[in-house]
Image (tube, coloured by chain):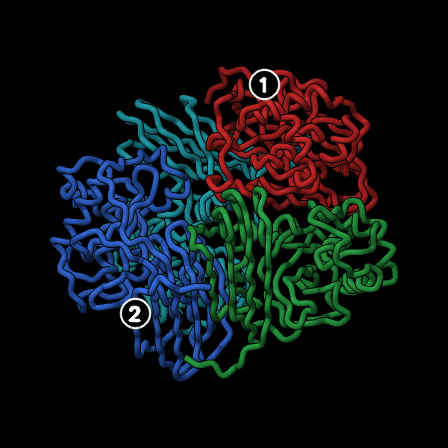
Chain colours: A red, B cyan, C green, D blue
Amino acid sequence: MKLAVSCQLTYETTQNTPLVLMLRPRSGAGQWVTKEEYLLDPNIPVVEYTDLYGNLCQRLLTPEGNFTVKTSAIVEAPDTIDVDFNANFVPVQELPDDSLIYLLPSRYCESDKLGNMASTIVQEATTGYEQVEAIRKWINENIDYQYGHSNASTSAQDTAQSQVGVCRDFSHLAVALCRSLNIPARFVVGYLYELKPMDLHAWFEAYLGGRWYTFDATQTQPRGNRVVLAYGRDAADVALATQFGEMELTSMFVSVEPVQENETL
Amino acid sequence: MKLAVSCQLTYETTQNTPLVLMLRPRSGAGQWVTKEEYLLDPNIPVVEYTDLYGNLCQRLLTPEGNFTVKTSAIVEAPDTIDVDFNANFVPVQELPDDSLIYLLPSRYCESDKLGNMASTIVQEATTGYEQVEAIRKWINENIDYQYGHSNASTSAQDTAQSQVGVCRDFSHLAVALCRSLNIPARFVVGYLYELKPMDLHAWFEAYLGGRWYTFDATQTQPRGNRVVLAYGRDAADVALATQFGEMELTSMFVSVEPVQENETL
Amino acid sequence: MKLAVSCQLTYETTQNTPLVLMLRPRSGAGQWVTKEEYLLDPNIPVVEYTDLYGNLCQRLLTPEGNFTVKTSAIVEAPDTIDVDFNANFVPVQELPDDSLIYLLPSRYCESDKLGNMASTIVQEATTGYEQVEAIRKWINENIDYQYGHSNASTSAQDTAQSQVGVCRDFSHLAVALCRSLNIPARFVVGYLYELKPMDLHAWFEAYLGGRWYTFDATQTQPRGNRVVLAYGRDAADVALATQFGEMELTSMFVSVEPVQENETL
Amino acid sequence: MKLAVSCQLTYETTQNTPLVLMLRPRSGAGQWVTKEEYLLDPNIPVVEYTDLYGNLCQRLLTPEGNFTVKTSAIVEAPDTIDVDFNANFVPVQELPDDSLIYLLPSRYCESDKLGNMASTIVQEATTGYEQVEAIRKWINENIDYQYGHSNASTSAQDTAQSQVGVCRDFSHLAVALCRSLNIPARFVVGYLYELKPMDLHAWFEAYLGGRWYTFDATQTQPRGNRVVLAYGRDAADVALATQFGEMELTSMFVSVEPVQENETL
């Protein structure tokens, strides 16, 4: 489906504050950006660079007072995600070099502490895709989706204990559990069509059978129509906005709408 | 100045032909892409990747028949280019690692063969910026700007002999001459406001005094309002369209227009 | 000083276990590897790759039974580390792109939780080098260096609470505290001459005044004669040996000795 | 076979001259460096970095007078090279992103000018491995291997005309011909056991059937026991020694010897 995605953030601050944003989707193997807009008000200088994971990052120094970022894009994204229960576990020694970093524990995914929990959850699953699906399903069924119980410091282990959280927490827990089974897993942020309530979203991918598969522990069924903004080890790597100082996010607006296909040159 | 740039290419082919394009400008230290559009007709699948030089490249397989690519962007670009006759020559041992590749000869810049020519041109110049400016000026004054005398295989050495060419040839010769003096030089392609006749353009950059400076041997005066599409060693690296098979470019349209500043969120 | 460094690890396992090692020092701006040896017994296949941080990593699948890795190198390393109390704090907006990742929290460095602690420690220090030195000194004076109180899961926050740990814990805490003040800090592993008892060692670097400075919270005085094996965000990134399965390290031997300078061709 | 390789270069110069060397082999998928030594006389500072192709490069400023570099290594390398006449041509649209640069023309490989020559040579070959082998064999049989007829500026086109050259020229011609058929090809430098007369050597690799295959147009039969020092587009990228100024190479000594396998820890 062709999707029109948009995100508008407004900040208020009493001092210049360095800010790093990851709000520009990249075209890649899985999605194609047809049109894109990135506006700042006031219109201050920005510098863009590519981080270690290949994400486009925008650096700027916010002005005092109010500051608004508005990004929008039209992106072609697959209607469905691939599901393959036969996708096998890839032994560590056969993994590609660049997937190995996704086996390591990270700030919000303490995979080194969650091995027992993972083993219990996947005990009846065949190794590979079934294990990841077992983890995803367990989280979907056992963790309460509720706002206000977690914050920017909440980690997978915290969520395993509290059994409550939001999409970010669900994904961190899933990633940590996969890694503890030696399955590379990465954290993804972006847009999901028909997410309710509409917001920026987080999900995860696992490396199985020689490629990355998309999973979403917040959903009961596989759903496509996703636009990826950034990939990383966890939310520390792919915070959509990292601010280095005090600054209040006074409003945030996200939308994802289908686009008519009959657009022409 | 805020510029609206646009490029439309139409191809005709009797077979599927692999094509690599470099038509998406990147935001970076020197320019900021506010808005961008990338349309294909028919709307076939594309995959984007980043090459070794950091350029965004679009890969696709053209359909049989007619095929059109239309890209456009609104980009903030500096009105002027920096000119600094005091920017000094950086000794090779003090150059940053990633500039060293721009000292080596390349397909269209046989710097290994043009040392004597360079020495003659710069003999009265102080080392550094003055040398590059002497090269730029010499080419501007001594090479005839004419279409139809060079082609995709024409190199700097060819141009040194024929003394005729277009922007691509001027830039290749300048790059080769700079490198023969151990000054890192790279080839740039993009848009230039008020270029006559309007077309995609090529110019060059030289590394002096710790940074890259913009030069353009086709112009008599320094001019800003440039939008960079890609950097590389020469036109082999940064061909805006590299086709792997027979295919005819049946039409090409380029425009660069100023944008009113009062655009709002 | 020219140093002969050596590390020998012996493992015992009942099954083939994937292992990633980071035991080959790289030549770089700060050290020069003159001679190097990397032996495996039994002599099984190894593949080497470079990780995201530029470290050389060796991948292998250990055989059943006993397995020994012995690496040794002769490395020229500076006798002293640079100390500069005038090295200033670099505002985030002026940091180089590739240092930004070292501002983010990571598995063992929960900088997002340690801001208050850092502020208290550095309250009398001028911003910049003095702050990092205040952190380093505080840890040296307030954390007990003792074996057996921390393990592979111990993080900076754990150490801040327990006030006991080893070189790895000291460094994690220092890194986390620096990052909470928006000073990029990275974790370093390697060899230190005359370390007592001799072992592989961990210390940290902070980015100040436009470059990285070496600090070591386990020492009372600045000491040079260090050989770096790997850099990273924390010990998750630069574990010298990451094993993916059960395997016992049955012995480990490390040595660092001075080499006579009169070696000749 | 385990090989002891060694290269000693002596220079004489009347002024400090910047020099970039590529004389340190890397461990990788195809070879494993067990032991290595890198000595300079006099013992001046060196800095090592990794170039765009992943090669380790050593930068230094030679002293006035005599200067000697001696590198040696013990490397495990396969006894044979893989030969597979069924390895198929990979259509450009299916090539991995990072192989695409090896389709482009480069300084010494004017593939844009050698398409007709390539078509003639491979006219009876099946597309894929057979084409590359036809090119390799044609060069082996039709180009005279002679010293003194080519130099550092000789390109593939020059060699196609003169029909005489050395290993470097043979490889440039082969690479250019492969690329003109849309087969990615890269230039390799290193050591070859039992090369006569012993010297540093150049050969090439072509991307077929999903991987790189080794070819050597100077040999009548496939031969293994090769140690790779560097990969690149051509000799401009992977000159083992690139000097930026006047300096005479007064002697050069290369050796490749088998090592007894019973070496122990």
Res. B124 visible in picture: yes
- Separation (CA) of disc 2 from disc 1: 62 Å
Horizontal side of residue D98 vs C12, given as left or right: left
Quadrant position of residue A181: top right
Q: Is residue D162 above or below residue A226?
A: below
Q: Position of residue C164 (x, y in %)?
A: 80, 56
Quadrant position of residue C139: bottom right
**Which residue is found at the position 36% from the left and 25% from the top?**
B67
The crowd level at tag 1 (other Cα within 10 Å; few <14, some 14-19, many 20+) is: some
Dot 1 corresponds to which residue?
A223
Q: Position of residue A262 (x, y in %)?
A: 49, 15
User: In terms of depth relative to the viewer, which is nearer, D256 or D151?
Assistant: D256
Q: Position of residue A189 (x, y in %)?
A: 63, 31
User: In terms of depth relative to the viewer, which is nearer, B257 or D121?
Assistant: D121
Res. B76 visible in picture: no
Query: Which quarter shows the N terminus of chain C?
Result: bottom right
Q: Position of residue D92 (x, y in %)?
A: 33, 35
Dot 2 corresponds to which residue?
D255
The amino acid beneath tag 2 is Ser
Q: Is residue B218 above or below residue A133?
A: below
The amino acid beneath tag 1 is Arg
Secondary structure beneath label 1: loop
The crowd level at tag 2 (other Cα within 10 Å; few <14, some 14-19, many 20+) is: some
**Which residue is found at the position 33% from the left and 65% from the top?**
D259
Q: Which mark is residue A241?
A: none
Foreground: disc 2 or disc 1: 2
User: In terms of depth relative to the viewer, which is nearer, C222 or A252?
Assistant: C222
Secondary structure beneath label 2: strand
- Chain to which mark 1 belongs: A
- Chain to which mark 2 belongs: D
Q: Is residue C187 above or below residue B31?
A: below
